[in-house]
């Protein structure tokens, strides 16, 4: 726990979830996904890479939550090293506390707890805070989109020819077994920088999601 005049920052715990959900419904929208306790628990508390002392942070003013820095912990391969990175899912401080240094205090505390922090999106309110604390803007990331029903969009199919016969068989799967970890250990050497996609991570990400139902194939 860290304190500054008028503020306290500490790790979000399971007992905080109802109050955090109420905070999002109050300051963002009554229907915001972060206002659902099941989503909060899945995204920030049930992650298999979570370790004590590094996780989502709450900004308190006395007994009231006034800020939330949602970091998804992820064991991240950087060359030959494994770092504990925090992927930014959301960063919000109640408007009346932004000018009092709440945003900077909250983000500084997060920077002490991870080896690396990343976010793939931020708004105009967060930009000056990030720049002021030394964050770097990386080049644009390439996003790939596979259009499965191109006829609905009036597009020509990307590959109109049927696939050639192959001995490879694709089957639906319901979860990633521990045997996947040996496969991942072979694949991970192909990527200089990547999230560790072991069976525990993939099951959390695609099998245990409280709302989305993914179709998995192996």
Image (tube, grey):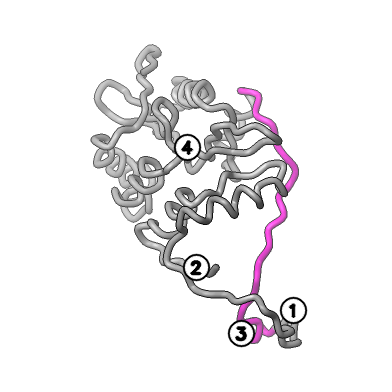
Q: How much space separates mark 4 and mark 3, taking CA atoms?
A: 38 Å
Q: Does the magenta stretch include residue 63?
A: no
Q: Which of marks 4 and 1 is nearer the N terminus?
A: 4
Q: How much space separates mark 2 and mark 3, taking CA atoms?
A: 24 Å
Q: Magenta part of the protein: which range?
A: 133-154
The foreground one among 48 and 31 is 48
Q: Position of residue 59 (x, y in %)?
A: 37, 27
The answer to the question of whether label 4 and label 2 lie on touching residues, with beta carbons closer than 8 A, is no
Residue at image mark 3: 152
Q: Is residue 137 magenta?
A: yes
User: Is 114 on the left or on the right of 17, as rendered?
Assistant: right
For the point 71% across and 50% down, which residue is it? 141
Q: Earlier in the sequence, mark 4 or mark 3?
A: 4
Q: What element carries label 2?
A: strand
Q: How much space separates mark 4 and mark 2, taking CA atoms?
A: 26 Å
Q: Is mark 3 on a helix, strand or loop?
A: helix
* Nearer to us: label 1 or label 3: 1
Residue at image mark 2: 216
Q: Earlier in the sequence, mark 2 or mark 1?
A: 1
* Residue 95 in sight in this render: no
For the point 65% across and 71% down, which residue is it? 146
| Quadrant, the N terminus | top left
Q: What element carries label 4?
A: strand
Q: How much space separates mark 1 and mark 3, taking CA atoms?
A: 14 Å
* Tag shown at residue 71: 4
Q: Position of residue 21 (x, y in %)?
A: 30, 44
Q: Earlier in the sequence, mark 2 or mark 3?
A: 3
User: Is 99 on the left or on the right of 77, as rendered?
Assistant: left
Q: Is mark 1 on a helix, strand or loop?
A: loop
User: Is 207 on the left or on the right of 22, as rendered?
Assistant: right
| Quadrant, the C terminus | bottom right
Residue at image mark 1: 158
């Amino acid at each position: 726990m860290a304190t500054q005049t008028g503020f306290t920052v500490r790790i979000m715990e399971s007992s905080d979830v109802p109050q955090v959900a109420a905070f999002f419904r109050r300051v963002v929208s009554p229907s915001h996904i972060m206002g659902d306790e099941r989503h909060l628990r899945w995204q920030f508390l049930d992650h298999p890479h979570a370790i004590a002392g590094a996780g989502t942070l709450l900004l308190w003013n006395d007994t009231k939550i006034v800020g939330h820095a949602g970091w998804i912990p992820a064991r991240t391969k950087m060359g030959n090293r494994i770092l504990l990175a925090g992927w930014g899912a959301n960063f919000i401080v109640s408007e009346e506390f932004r000018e009092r240094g709440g945003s900077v205090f909250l983000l500084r505390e997060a920077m002490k707890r991870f080896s690396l922090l990343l976010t793939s999106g931020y708004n105009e309110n967060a930009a000056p805070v990030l720049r002021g604390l030394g964050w770097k803007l990386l080049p644009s990331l390439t996003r790939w989109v596979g259009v499965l029903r191109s006829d609905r969009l009036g597009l020509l199919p990307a590959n109109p020819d049927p696939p050639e016969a192959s001995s490879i068989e694709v089957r639906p799967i319901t979860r990633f077994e521990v045997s996947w970890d040996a496969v991942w250990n072979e694949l991970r050497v192909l990527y200089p920088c990547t999230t560790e996609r072991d069976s525990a991570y993939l099951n959390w990400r695609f099998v245990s999601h409280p709302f989305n139902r993914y179709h998995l194939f192996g």
